[in-house]
Every structure is written in C-alpha cells, then in structure tokens.
C-alpha cells in the first residue's frame, strides 16, 4: 500500500483481537519511527514496549480507565528526555520541541503499523505521575503518549474532517485562497 492509501486507512482502534502481534513487527515499526524529524536532530524520544498484562492494566487505570489499553498486544510508551532537549534548546525545547518531536515519531509509528495491517490508538490522556511510576521513569524522562497496538477487532468509521477550504488561508490568516 502506498503512503496515500496508508494515511486514508489509518483510524484509531479501541478493540483488539486476542491474537498477539509478533514483536519483530513492533521493532520494525519503531525503526521507522526514529526516522522522524526532530529539533536539531536531538532525537530525545525514548520508547518502552509494554507486554506485561499487569503493567498494561495499571497503565489503563492511569489513563483514566481507558480499558481498551489492557486488551492490546502491546502498549508503546513514547517518552522524552527533558534534559537532553533542554540542554539543546532551553525552555522552548522543553515546552514545545519535545512534544513536536515525539508527535512526529508517533505519526511515523502508527502509519508504519497501519501499512503492516496492525491497528493502533494514540492516548495522551493519562496521569503523568502514575505512568512515570508504573514505567519506572527517571525524573528527566517524561511520558508523552501511550500507543495501543494489536490486530483490529472492529472497523471504526473515521470521524468527519472539516473541509480544507474552511481552515485554509493564503498569505495571512483570514485571507482565502482564490
């Protein structure tokens, strides 16, 4: 499938089959995740693959009871090394770049998984302190996303998107493309 088909096919899946995804596919997808751009090539992202059922249950609870997380084959935690990005870019790196960089890596990851016919869902709603404790993160490593991964047991319909012409401007905000 080409990149256009992959982007069109990607949806957030919250129901997974009880069939384990082979870890080699997760590793392969992460190889593409790290090809994402990062501020000054800092690559401050860190990845934790969680397979342990007890940890998945704890993460689901820390994610405000998003129980579908515990049904996934894996949860991939994308974290950022706050010290590394701060040393490179100061406050702006910590407040902006680390989130952008991890988002680029997450996009590469979920699109690669989609191309492999593996479903995923990005979760950013969680208690940072609880997730940090569950994953035994040092104080300078911050959790950014939890991504559930597995084989889809549903075919969710993509929510409608706003028409491009309603959000596109030309040269300045408010000026429409003619």
Image (spheres, rainbow, N blue to C red):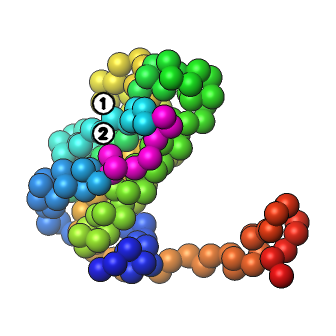
User: Can residue 114 be seen in this snapshot?
Assistant: yes
Question: Along the line of sight, which residue is nearer the eye, 126 or 27?
Answer: 27
Left/right of residue 95 with respect to residue 26 in the rendered view: right
Residue 39 on the magenta span: yes
Disc 1 and disc 2 in contact, CB within 8 angstroms? no
**Residue 104 appears at what percent x and percent y?**
46, 50
Residue 24 - label: none
Q: Which image quarter is the C terminus in?
A: bottom right
Secondary structure at numbered mark 2: strand
Residue 170's spot in the image, x, y percent? 80, 68
Q: On screen, 74 above or below 90? A: below
Is 90 left or right of 155, judged from the image as shown? right
Among all residues in the image, which is located at the extreme right?
174
Q: Which residue is found at the position 34% from the left and 42% from the top?
A: 77
Highlighted magenta segment, given as a residue range: 33-40
Sequence-first disc among 1 and 2: 2
- Residue at point 32%, 46% (across, down): 34
- The residue that mark 1 highlights is 135
* Type of secondary structure dominating the magenta stretch: loop
Tell me if I can see residue 59 in this picture: no
Residue in the picture at 25% in, 56% down: 29
């Amino acid at each position: 499938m080409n990149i256009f088909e992959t982007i069109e096919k990607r949806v957030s899946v919250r129901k997974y089959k009880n069939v384990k995804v082979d870890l080699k596919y997760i590793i392969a997808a992460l190889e593409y995740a790290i090809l994402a751009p990062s501020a000054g090539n800092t690559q401050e992202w860190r990845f934790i693959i969680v397979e342990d059922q007890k940890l998945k249950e704890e993460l689901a609870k820390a994610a405000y009871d998003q129980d579908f997380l515990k049904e996934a084959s894996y949860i991939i935690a994308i974290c950022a090394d706050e010290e590394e990005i701060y040393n490179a870019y100061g406050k702006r790196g910590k407040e902006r770049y680390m989130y952008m960089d991890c988002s680029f890596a997450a996009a590469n990851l979920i699109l690669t998984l989609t191309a492999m016919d593996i479903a995923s869902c990005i979760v950013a709603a969680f208690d940072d302190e609880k997730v940090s404790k569950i994953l035994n993160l040092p104080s300078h490593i911050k959790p950014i996303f939890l991504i559930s991964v597995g084989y889809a047991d549903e075919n969710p319909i993509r929510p409608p998107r706003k028409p491009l012409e309603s959000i596109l401007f030309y040269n300045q905000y408010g000026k429409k493309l003619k």
